[in-house]
Image (cartoon, coloured by chain):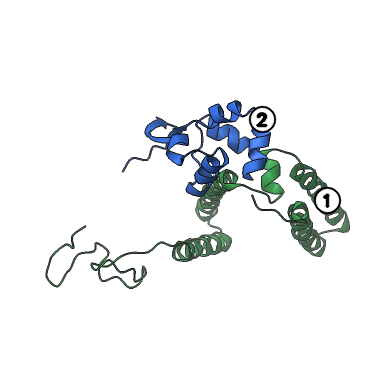
Chain colours: A green, B blue
Amino acid sequence: MTKNKHARWIAPASTLAIGTAMAIAVRIGHTWTYAIVTEVIVVLFAVGYYLLAGTKSDVGAIYGQRKDERQRHVVMKASRFAMIVMYGVTFVIALIMVAANKTYWQEDVIASVGGVSYFLALLAYGAHDEDAAGDDRGIMATDSVLGVDEKNNVRPPM
Amino acid sequence: MSSKLYIMKNEVREYRRTRELSQADLAEGLGVSRQTIIAIENGRYSPSLPLAFRIARYFEVPVETMFDPSEEAEA
């Protein structure tokens, strides 16, 4: 279990920082009223996360930055599910916008950045390929995706 | 390749009760959450190798005694 003296403040502080940035954007694009309402909601969420992080539950441990190995697995599975849902919703919105003959460049940005990030993460977190000699030369250095010795037309022994 | 998740059967609950320990006590001793101990005892989570060895050492038994890989339950 990860332990940090100030761990309980990470989620609320992050919420405040991101939420305040959003409130500033709201003020720039809209009125003070909307901006203040946004900031109030952000503060309420930050307080909620602080209280939640103090509970002795799985969610409390996750938001309190004291996850053990099982809770890290839970977070990974939940994050993957959320990512799939977000991609699905983004794609549906893009379909609607395109069908309505409107541009939706945001979907292009999200999909492109998401796709490249996923590929880079695969490389960074250890997705490799082995050549016929069994040496790990990295995913970009293989002679053949299938691992076949193409010169001699022989598949290497397993 | 099967995509089913198999959980190893274990004797964690039995050894814990023998020592009259609560799940919270065991969790604190192992540095994990009580929910994780509950999940392990109920067969809903198989611990990692380091944690499995820590559990076995905590009860001073071989890891093969604590976890039986020949008995697997489908999760």
Where is residue A9 drawn, in percent x and y?
A: 78, 54
Q: Quadrant of the C terminus of chain A?
A: bottom left
Residue A131 sits above or below residue A86 on the image: below
Q: Residues within 10 Å of mark 1 (few under 14, many from 20)?
A: some
- Identify the residue at the far front of this view: B60
Q: Quadrant of residue A130?
A: bottom left
Nearer to us in this view, A11 or A113? A11
Q: Residues within 10 Å of mark 2 (few under 14, many from 20)?
A: few
Residue B73 sits above or below residue B60 on the image: above
Which residue is denoted by mark 1 in the rendering?
A43
Which residue is denoted by mark 2 in the rendering?
B22
For label 1, the SS is: helix
Output the chain of dot 1: A
Mark 2, mark 1: which one is toward the viewer? 2
Structural distance between the alpha carbons of marks 2 and 1: 38 Å
Q: Tag 2: residue type?
A: Ser
Q: Tag 1: residue type?
A: Val
For label 2, the SS is: loop
Where is residue A64 drawn, in percent x and y?
A: 72, 49
Residue B52 sits above or below residue A28 on the image: above
Nearer to us in this view, B55 or A8? B55
Where is residue B33 drawn, in percent x and y?
A: 64, 40
Answer left or right for A152 relative to A141: left
Output the chain of dot 2: B
